[in-house]
Image (cartoon, grey):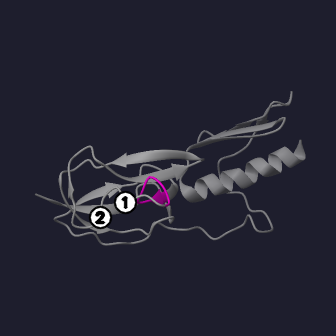
Amino acid sequence: MQDLLNKAKELMQWAERYGIDEISITNGSEKIHLSKNGVAASNYPLQASVSAAPVVTSGSANLPPQEVPKVSPSSSFKKVVSPMVGTFYKAPGPDAQPFKKEGDRVQAGDTVCIVEAMKIMNQIKSPHEGILRKILVNNSEVVLKDQVLMEIEPA
């Protein structure tokens, strides 16, 4: 049980670091579910309650916090932001053409990229219409929730 609690503490640190509100992990018979309200549950008869406050542990799990990169988007441009933590992809596959390139016309609702989170490919659709002026992240880069991915000039 102590191993499971230690794993839960490490997951809480990771979730807090990347701004994740809820996470569930299954590994064989072990199951961990964490949510912002601070409850960790397993399939063991004993239910564990763990505080959502940061936990200090020794070893590689104790990493310095990362901040969303400070990019100053143009005030006249509309933003496309990541709705989640994940990996940014410009194209639907490694050999495929990008959804959109800088200078392309974008319609509201067009898929402009993918953010992969927990092996799920989430299509990110543009909330704005205009010209894609700047892609602010690199392909395969980890992005954070609410990080600005692209700038669109209204047209």
Q: Is residue 75 left or right of residue 79?
A: left
Mark 1 touching mark 2, by CB under 8 A?
Answer: yes
Query: On screen, 146 above or below 61?
Result: above
Quarter of the image for the C terminus: give it: bottom left
Task: Identify the residue at horizontal 27%, vertical 58% (top origin).
Answer: 79
Task: Identify the residue at horizontal 26%, vertical 47% (top origin).
Answer: 127
Find the magenta span and give its range: 88-94
Mark 1 Cα shell of 10 Å, populated few (<14), some (14-19), many (≥20) = some
Q: Which mark is residue 141?
A: none
Mark 2 Cα shell of 10 Å, populated few (<14), some (14-19), many (≥20) = some
Where does residue 92 sit, x and y in percent of width and height?
Answer: 44, 52
Quarter of the image for residue 75 reads bottom left
Q: Which residue is mark 2?
A: 101
Most frequent secondary structure within the magenta stretch: loop
Give yes or no for residue 93 being in the magenta stretch. Answer: yes
Q: Amino acid at mark 2?
A: Lys
Where does residue 100 sit, x and y in percent of width and height?
Answer: 30, 59
Task: Identify the residue at horizontal 65%, vertical 47% (top origin).
Answer: 52
Where does residue 139 sit, x and y in percent of width and height?
Answer: 46, 66
Q: Amino acid at mark 1?
A: Pro
Q: Which residue is mark 1?
A: 98
Query: On screen, 31 above or below 11?
Result: above
Quarter of the image for the N terminus: give it: top right
Query: On screen, 81 above or below 68?
Result: above
Where does residue 38 sit, x and y in percent of width and height?
Answer: 65, 41
